[in-house]
C-alpha cells in the first residue's frame, strides 16, 4: 500500500474506518465538503495557470461533478479569495518518496497545491469553515519534508490558506520539524503494515486489529450505523 497523509490521518482518527475504506475497499459517497474542495482546488489551479476566472469556476464545477450542494456562486467566491499572483509557482506537485532507507520501507505520496519555483514556500488551499493551526497535524510537515528531499532544502515555509477567512496559518519548517513529521508517518505506516500482516494470517481478527474510535467524525462517516450496531452489542 502506498500511503498519503490523509490515509495515515484517517487511521489515527479511526482504524475501523480506515480498514473499511482502504483494506476492504468500500467506496465512500462524495460529500459536499469533499466535492467543494475538489472543485475549488481545480479552479484555483486553473487560474494560477492562466485560465480566466469564469472558465476556471466552470472547470471546478465539472471537477465537483456538479454536486447538488455545490453552487457556482460559492465556488466562485472562494476562488476569488485566493491571493493569486502571476508566476507564483507550480501547481499540483506530485511526489512519491520512501519514508526510510530500510528494506521494504513504506512509500509516501502526496499532491502539493502550490510550490514556489525555488521550493522555499508551499501552499495548501482550505475550504474549511473552521480554521486551525498549521502545526495541529503533520500534513504540511510531510509536504515540507518531501520538498526538502526533492529540492535539498533545509527550511520550507508551509502555508495553510483558509479561503473563507482570507487568512493563512504558516510556519517555517526546519530539518527537525520535517524529521518529526517523517517519523510520525513512518511509525503509523509501520503499525498499519504490521496489522495487515497479522490480518493475512488471522482474518477473523479484523475488528480487533482495527478498532472503532467514536468521535465527532462519526457524524460524517458512512459506516457509523454499521459500526454502532456491531460494537454496541459487545
Image (cartoon, rainbow, N blue to C red):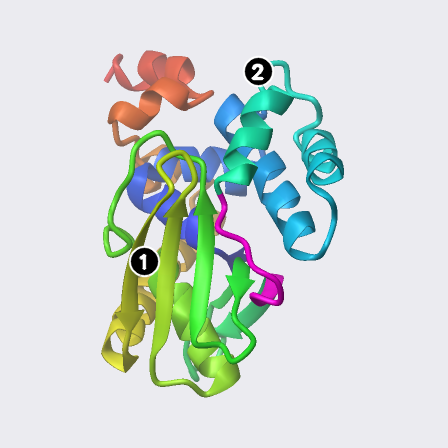
Residue 59 or residue 103, whichever sits in front: 59
The quarter of the rendered structure image containing the N terminus is bottom right
For mark 2, what is the residue?
69
- Tell me the residue at 43%/40% (across/down): 163
* Left-right relation of 3 to 136: right
Q: Position of residue 218 (x, y in %)?
A: 33, 22
Q: Which residue is mark 1?
A: 138
**Secondary structure beneath label 2:** loop
Task: Please give the name of the residue rendered at 35% of the width and 36% of the height, measured from the top-left corner.
Answer: 165
Q: Residue furthest bottom?
A: 152
Q: Is residue 158 above or below residue 118?
A: above
Occupied quadrant, residue 131 = top left
SS of the residue at dot 1? loop
**What's the magenta bit mostly, secondary-structure-wise?**
loop
Examine the rendering and report whether any part of residue 170 can be seen: yes
**Position above or below: 145 against 135:** below
Numbered disc in front, either 1 or 2: 2
Residue 142 percent across, percent down from the top left:
39, 65
* Magenta highlight on residue 160: no
Magenta stretch: give its range. Answer: 82-92
**85 sits left or right of 141 in the view:** right
User: Mark 1 or mark 2: which comes first in sequence?
Assistant: 2
In this view, the residue in front, 180 or 54, is 54
Q: Residue at x 68, y 40 (%)?
A: 53
Residue closest to the eye, 107 or 89? 89
> Viewer-proximal residue, 149 or 169?
169
Position of residue 92 relative to residue 232, above or below, is below
- Whether residue 110 appears in this view of the structure is no
Q: Would you place residue 128 above or below residue 10 in this image?
A: above
Amino acid at each position: 500500500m502506498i500511503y498519503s497523509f490523509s490515509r495515515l490521518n484517517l487511521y489515527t482518527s479511526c482504524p475501523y474506518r480506515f480498514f473499511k475504506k482502504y483494506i476492504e475497499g468500500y467506496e465512500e459517497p462524495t460529500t459536499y465538503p469533499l466535492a467543494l474542495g475538489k472543485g475549488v482546488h481545480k479552479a484555483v489551479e486553473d487560474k494560477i495557470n492562466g485560465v480566466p476566472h469564469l472558465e476556471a469556476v466552470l472547470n471546478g464545477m465539472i471537477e465537483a461533478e456538479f454536486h447538488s450542494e455545490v453552487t457556482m456562486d460559492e465556488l466562485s467566491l472562494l476562488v476569488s479569495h485566493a491571493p493569486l499572483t502571476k508566476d507564483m509557482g507550480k501547481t499540483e506537485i506530485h511526489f512519491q518518496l520512501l519514508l526510510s532507507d530500510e528494506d521494504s520501507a513504506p512509500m509516501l505520496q502526496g499532491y502539493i497545491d502550490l510550490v514556489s519555483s525555488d521550493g522555499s514556500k508551499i501552499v495548501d488551499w482550505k475550504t474549511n469553515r473552521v480554521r486551525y493551526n498549521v502545526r495541529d497535524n503533520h500534513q504540511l510537515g510531510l509536504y515540507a519534508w518531501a520538498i526538502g528531499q526533492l529540492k535539498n532544502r533545509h527550511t520550507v515555509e508551509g502555508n495553510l490558506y483558509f479561503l473563507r477567512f482570507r487568512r493563512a496559518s504558516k510556519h517555517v519548517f526546519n530539518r527537525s520539524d520535517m524529521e518529526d513529521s517523517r517519523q510520525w508517518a513512518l511509525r503509523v505506516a509501520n503499525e498499519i503494515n504490521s496489522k495487515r500482516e497479522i490480518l493475512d494470517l488471522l482474518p477473523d481478527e479484523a475488528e480487533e486489529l482495527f478498532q472503532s474510535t467514536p468521535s465527532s467524525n462519526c457524524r460524517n462517516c458512512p459506516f457509523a450505523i454499521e459500526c454502532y450496531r456491531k460494537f454496541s452489542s459487545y
